Structure formats: C-alpha cells, structure tokens
Amino acid sequence: MLRRIISQFEPISLEQMSGIKLMNRTDTKFVTSERLLYELLQLAHSHYYAQQIGDERIARYFTAYFDTVPHDMYIMHQNGHLNRQKVRIRSYVDSHLDFLEVKTKDNHGRTKKKRITMQNFDAAHPQHDILFRRQDDDFVAYDDFLRQHLRFAPESLTQQLENNFNRITLVNKARTERLTIDTGLRFYNLVTGCRRDLTGLAIIELKRDGLQPSPILDMMLELRIKPSGFSKYCMGQALTNADLKHNRFKPRMRLVERLLGNDT
C-alpha cells in the first residue's frame, strides 16, 4: 500500500536534495496511524517530491543507542532538561553507511548533530558489546570524537536500545521544507531483553526554513493530525523498561496505544 502511494510522487535525487539548504530550520514532529498517513500522502502527492536512491523511495534505518548505566541521558529528558544529549550509531542500511553521532539540544530548543564514520559495523548482525575505549586506531578516533562533543566520559557508555524503521523523505515543490516519515518502528532493549513492535504507527517530522508556508500543515489540520514530540530513544526506553521513571512520556505512551488500537 505505502509503496503504491509513494510511487505517485515525482522523484527527486539525493544530489538534488543536497542543494536544499534550510538555513533557519525549525522542526516539528507529528505522530499518527498508518491509516491516516495513507490519506495524508494521497492529499500531498501533487505538492511534494519523493527522494529516490537508485530505484528505492523507502530507506531502511538501524540505530543503536548508548547511555550511562544509570541512564543519565534518558533521565535528563524525562526530567525536562532542555540542554541534553544523545549518542547513537545510525546505519543507513541500504547504502551501507554507518555513523557514530552525538545529538545536542540547547536551551533554545535547537539541535546540533556531530558525527564520524563508524568502521566495520554490520547493521544486519550488530554487536551488542561495543565499549568506547581506546583499544585500536578506530576507537582512538571515536574516543577523541566523543570527548570533543559529549559531556559524558566515553568509557561510561553502554549499549541500551536498538531500533529499526523505514523512512520516506519528501521535499515540497518550493524546496523550502523536508518531511521525513518513519514507519515499521521496532525496538529491542538490550538491558531488559524486551521487544516492542510499533508497526501501524507513523512518525512525521517537518523541517522547514523558518516560518515559510507549508502545504502539509493544512492537510494535517484537515485530518486532525496534531504536533507531538517523539524521541525514539526515550519512547523506546519507556516502552521496554518498566523500571525507568516515565511520567513525562505517559501522554505519548497513551497516544501510541490509542493509535495502535490497544487502548481499553
């Protein structure tokens, strides 16, 4: 169904995408069901291009998240700290590209991402025991990178959570915004052994240049799709580790269950 709908969009290449610079970017997330996503895409197809790499318009992603043993990064988000960080390995599965990334959100809500290429990482068969210590040349580079950009000591990090999802990227015809749409989201918690499949859910992120008019916003309003924050790391932890405090995420957890039809 999704492939058929997305095939109706005009394509845009990765090279053409690289020329789109959002200099004063604002980001807004939305959470909805795949059923409403299909309706949204039917409305949007004449207003947007779909990114195409080779013959594919749906890209596979894998992420491994790291945190300290006491879950300091998760707790900072749960407690409402605006100035916070996340560490992950992000794999673009079909392109065989893997990056170690540090995401930093400042007190003004702006997010900066720094990354370095991760060598010899296999998203199809991921290691579950990666420790950031200076055991070889590659890990010396990772250690230096983390010490430059992260507020936590690299040796304090352990693998916590994995996720897989599929991503569609759209660009409006005016080329003033990008829209990423994530579906098929699945979590595996390495600490608890718990898995959670959120197939049927769609996470949409609108990235636009300042407050430029956005054709998708009126369509979302028509379908009653409302803005909702959704951190994949924090929501994945909250949904797979009952021992963690998750008061801040309860409204989003209830929204997820409602959209998946699991509410009672």
Image (cartoon, grey):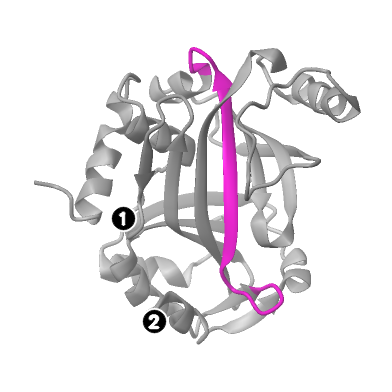
Residue depicted at x 74% and y 25%: 149
- In the displayed structure, 101 sits above or below 40; it is above
Quadrant of the frame with the N terminus: bottom left
Dot 1 and dot 2 residues touching (CB under 8 Å) = no
Question: Secondary structure beneath disc 2?
Answer: helix
Q: Which of the two discs, 1 and 2, sits closer to the camera?
A: 2
Image coordinates of residue 211 in percent, x first then y, are 53, 57
**Who is closer to the viewer here, 195 or 257?**
195
Based on the picture, tell me whether residue 61 belongs to the magenta stretch.
yes
Image coordinates of residue 179 in percent, x first then y, are 53, 63
The residue sitting at the left extreme is 264
The magenta segment is 52-72
- Rate crowding at label 1 as few (under 14), some (14 to 19) or many (20 or more) other CA atoms within 10 Å: few
**Who is closer to the viewer here, 125 or 40?**
125
Q: Give the labeled residue for mark 2.
A: 42
Whichever of labels 1 and 2 marks the residue nearer the N terminus, that label is: 2
The answer to whether residue 6 is seen in the rendering is: yes
Question: Secondary structure beneath disc 1?
Answer: loop
Residue depicted at x 44% and y 78%: 44
- Rate crowding at label 2 as few (under 14), some (14 to 19) or many (20 or more) other CA atoms within 10 Å: some
Q: What amino acid is labelled 1 in the image?
A: Lys
Q: Give the labeled residue for mark 1.
A: 226
- In the displayed structure, 107 sits above or below 27; it is above
The answer to whether residue 106 is seen in the rendering is: no
Residue depicted at x 56% and y 56%: 207
Image coordinates of residue 113 in percent, x first then y, are 68, 39
